[in-house]
Amino acid sequence: MEFTQDKFARHMQGINGSAIREIFKLLARPGMISFAGGNPSNTALEPDVVSRLAQEALAKHGTALLQYGGTDGFGPLKESAAEFLRGDGVNCEAVDILPVQGGSQAFDLLLKALIDPGDVVLCESPTFLGAIQAMREYNARLVDMPMDGEGVIVEAAEELIRKHHPKMMYVIPTFQNPTGITLSLERRRALAALAAKYGVVIAEDDPYRDLRYSGEPLPPIQSFDEEGWVVYMSSFSKYIAPGLRLGAAAVKNPMLLRKMVIGKQSADVHSPLLNQAVVDAYLRQGLMPGHLKRICGDYRRQLDAMLAGFRYFPDGTTHTVPQGGLFVWAELPEGMDGLAAFHAAVEAGVAFVPGTHFYPDGGHENTLRLNFSMCDIPTIEAGMEKLGRVLTEMKK
Amino acid sequence: MEFTQDKFARHMQGINGSAIREIFKLLARPGMISFAGGNPSNTALEPDVVSRLAQEALAKHGTALLQYGGTDGFGPLKESAAEFLRGDGVNCEAVDILPVQGGSQAFDLLLKALIDPGDVVLCESPTFLGAIQAMREYNARLVDMPMDGEGVIVEAAEELIRKHHPKMMYVIPTFQNPTGITLSLERRRALAALAAKYGVVIAEDDPYRDLRYSGEPLPPIQSFDEEGWVVYMSSFSKYIAPGLRLGAAAVKNPMLLRKMVIGKQSADVHSPLLNQAVVDAYLRQGLMPGHLKRICGDYRRQLDAMLAGFRYFPDGTTHTVPQGGLFVWAELPEGMDGLAAFHAAVEAGVAFVPGTHFYPDGGHENTLRLNFSMCDIPTIEAGMEKLGRVLTEMKK
């Protein structure tokens, strides 16, 4: 018998993989300047440090790191990650921490615990592509929340909650992917209050918060939550190394944490102990503050170079001025087509991600997401000039 | 608002976690002899080797191991794992290989790709507990296939296929968990033929096959499959180390592989590159054959000690005589209660897993699963004597 498409589960039928991952294939062309990714800079990665920590961890814990571990996580990391997150203002103890395979898995487990087909999730618009795909795989119904320069507009969100009775709200509050926008303090407090008032779980996806280059840190939404409605999802991908695949969720609601642990039992039993022990050692040896200081200094200069490069862009272009993170968001003059621009730009040797991909319902063709962490400053300058020229040419 | 149970997705409502994981908590008692787990022996684990390989891999690949990687896996491992699996008789090339977080994740991704709520999965009875939980989390309907000492009875399986039109058949063909039974050669061929005839995907879960202590290796079911209906799931957990969380699926059907990759994008983006590189180096440096020879020699003696220990058990007890793997399955005389025996045995300082947990619909209270890999020979002898005494006492 022949294997046909209708063998697949309904929730997977229409999903053909991340548009961004297809774009990445183009980036392999020699000489391509890429503003398309979301990776840390190679200069931010420390293979020698990871190698040393792995050796030390295996010498210290021995076979215990190679046996099966608990699904709820490696004890020492639960402690050190809780301490790290408390430093970021998260209200948590070791017992609330679930080590996961990067922030993606925390969100996946939360969807698995909560979402029945057709359940509504409110999300920012635009929002993280990977999250859109994850929500679709659970047949969630995505409803956009309107945003402005301070993030989600709370009154509009409340109206949508009354109308759609969502199970969950998905928010990236700090240096949002893709816009770079940061949710204001008052709105953080207000969203936490909405969650408790209406019984909506907030998935607070906050992997960039310690990549701050200016302005003052704001407390997480989770810090205003007194009843366990906000799940805080952090990741060590942007701070230490994405290749280690390690993140940590803080889940104050023990019933919800338990269901996420059960979901993880079936998904992968537990996160690899060596990786958990390496991150634990990184935190315990106090390496994080100095490392963040160094990489933030570099990223800040790269961001500044990118912002300066908008002088090459067509008149009428607007863009965000993020205080941190990895992305700048640009809107081209109305009527310009970011998808056509993408193809012309790739021809010219510079790549970005068309903004339309970040909208659950598409549209917004005149938007682009630009990453500045993966290129050095001369490359950013050359790339922005090149991209500006392509766009200016298209506008004529 | 208070968080109530009805917030959870329907498929997670009734699932309260692995019974085995609850049992494991009892094993922490000092002096407890445990036949309950399914771990490799600590003496089979090689922290020094893993430490050296991690160092070498990070020195060789540098930051490439710390960046994001492809969801479809680390190229060198796809090659070396394909070669390793070909040595086991699996029909595969590097392009067919998906590195995963242990065999559990391969099965989870396969369920995600194929199962709509209510879809039928045929499974062995008894079968692996973790698989039962995973299938339930997708709201699959589990239908038992009758087994005898040569594994699944093919005629019965065909009848069930005609009756239930299953999407999938889940089979552990070699040294099955929990029974230790190996599916015969003819039945392997016949099941592959059934899959193609009726269009049923076979999930062939084969993590124990290289732990063979006697008899001749049999080709995988997958080797008889010409149309890509059989997904072969291997794992390095039992061969190298479960704590690394690394397995490999061989998926000859490119459409199905693609859907599994898409599912993995959302689940965890990719498997950690360091772990993939360590296993790759382990295979390339030719460490596997000698290692397997050493651990199989040890496990064989442990198995023999356990089998000899049945002399302490009540008359009328029957048990399997596996040619490999980690488990022996016993049936106590009809009417004896394995759950009551479990509590009495734990009181006496020896633990096992009551067999009823391995049946999707329960029952079979007179069965037990016994693991022999985690105890040395004197401990196995002492534990079997102790357990035999408890059971004989109960039978009176």
Image (cartoon, coloured by chain):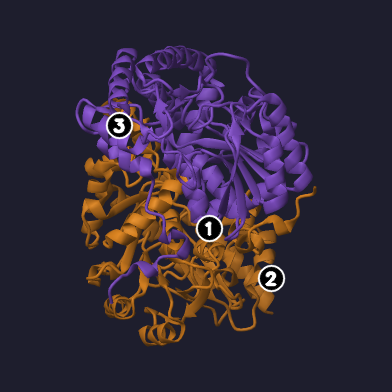
Chain colours: A purple, B orange
> How far apart are labels 1 and 2 at the CA level?
43 Å
Q: Quadrant of residue A228?
A: top right
Q: Which percent across, then down, holds residue B19?
A: 62, 61
CA gap, disc 3 to disc 1? 40 Å
Circle 3 residues within 10 Å: few <14, some 14–19, many ≥20: many
Residue A118 point in image, percent of width and height: 59, 59
Instruction: State the mark number for residue B57.
Output: 3
Under circle 1, the secondary element is loop
- Which quadrant: the N terminus of chain A? bottom left
Crowding at mark 2 (Cα within 10 Å: few <14, some 14-19, many 20+): some
Please say whether residue B171 is visible from this viewpoint.
yes
**Residue at 26%, 77% in the rendered image:** B189
What is the quadrant of the C terminus of chain A in the image?
top left
The disc, 3 or 2, on the residue closer to the chain's N-terminal end is 3
Q: Are marks 1 and 2 in contact (CB under 8 Å)?
A: no
Mark number, residue A251: none
SS assignment at label 3? helix
The residue that appears at 42% across and 30% down in the rendered structure is A369
Q: Which residue is mark 2?
A: B340
Q: Residue A123's spot in the image, x, y percent?
A: 58, 43
Which amino acid type corresponds to the residue marked 3 in the rendered image? Answer: Ala
Residue A271 appears anywhere in the view:
no
Residue at the limit of the structure toward the front, as seen here: A396
Q: Residue at x 55, y 44 (%)?
A: A107
The residue closer to the viewer here, B149 or B168, is B168
Disc marking residue A139: 1
Chain at tag 3: B
Amino acid found under the numbered disc labelled 2: Ala
- Left or right position of A96 against A269: right
Q: Chain of mark 2?
A: B
Tell me the kind of residue under disc 1. Asn
